[in-house]
Amino acid sequence: MATSANALLCFFLFLLPLSINAATFQIVNRCSFTVWAAWVSTGPRTGGGSQLSPGQSWTINVNASTTGGRIWARTGCSFDSSGRGSCQTGDCGGVLQCQDYGRPPNTLAEFALNQFNNLDFFDISLVEGYNVGLDFSPTTGGCRGVRCSANIVGECPAPLRVPGGCNSPCAMFWTPEYCCTNGPCRPTIWDFFKRRCPDAYTSPQDDQTSTFTCPAGTNYSVTFCP
Ligand SMILES: *[C@@H]1O[C@H](CO)[C@@H](O)[C@H](O)[C@H]1NC(C)=O
Ligand SMILES: *[C@@H]1O[C@H](CO)[C@@H](O)[C@H](O)[C@H]1NC(C)=O
């Protein structure tokens, strides 16, 4: 009797919260070209990567002890059989299985799971520039998602243009003026991104309207070139 009561207690205290707080992300490549998807957690770094031909998808299960992370596409990669190589955009230290953030420009799907009020917080961020369009949407939970798929690479201002993408002013020039660490962001250059993707988080001082919420336990899809 005591044993089964303990087992039941164990289930409710341990297993149930675990299954509630974990999240599944289905990452889909709708681009007309191959991308190398990547994700890493915030905090203690863990992550991974997967080559996706057009139409392919990759599902990751982010466990309950992972509070947050980011997902992005790498482009123009080549890796050897041991998973070492490089990418034109989003490269994470020359490995297929990312354990660290990517090199800009890379459009980011960012998330923080099970935060304040048992909510997930998520956004699309262009603070590290733009390489491919993104859609970041819940697949459960009845809440709304966010999309940024404008022609940002094609219309990129010349000073920000780099092979395979459009860099952010901060990642490109790396000065307090452009990273907005010494006062307000200079609107003109950051406005290029905000006009094209009003729902995305586009500069280091962007307001909170670019952050979206869903109940903790929601599953998501992240689509490249939606
Ligand atoms: C859960 O994820 C964390 C990092 O986010 C990792 O350190 C840990 O090993 C994972 N646990 C399981 C059971 O997969
Ligand atoms: C999320 O996905 C997992 C794994 O596929 C599933 O077990 C869970 O029920 C899903 N959550 C919701 C809220 O549907």
Image (cartoon, helix red, strand yellow):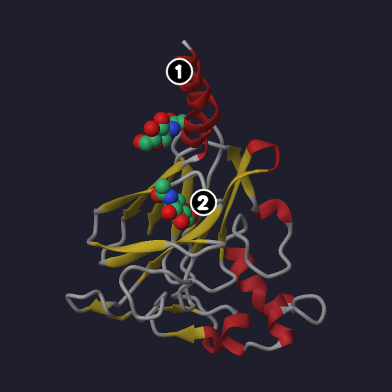
Q: Residue at x 52, y 58 (%)?
A: 69
Q: Which residue is mark 2?
A: 66
Q: Amino acid at mark 1?
A: Thr
Amino acid type for the residue under numbered disc 2: Thr
Task: Respond yes or no on whether mark 1 lies under 8 Å from ligand 1.
Answer: no
Distance CA(mark 2)–CA(mark 1): 31 Å
**Viewer-nearest of labels 2 and 1?**
1
> What residue is rendered at 47% in x and 41% in y?
22
Query: Foreground: 69 or 72?
Result: 69
Mark 1 sits on what residue? 3
Q: Nearer the viewer, residue 10 or 124?
A: 10
Looking at mark 2, is its residue's CB closer than 8 Å to ligand 1?
Answer: yes
Rate crowding at label 1 as few (under 14), some (14 to 19) or many (20 or more) other CA atoms within 10 Å. few
Picture quadrant of residue 225: bottom left
Question: Where in the figure is residue 178, as x and y percent of width and height?
Answer: 69, 83
Which residue: 50% across, 63% down? 108
Say which element carries label 2: loop
Question: Could you tell which of marks 2 and 1 lies nearer the N-terminus?
Answer: 1
How many callouts does the rendering have?
2
> Taking 224 as reference, is 17 above or below it?
above
Q: Going 44% across and 37% down the picture, which residue do you hit?
A: 139
- Residue extending furthest left? 81
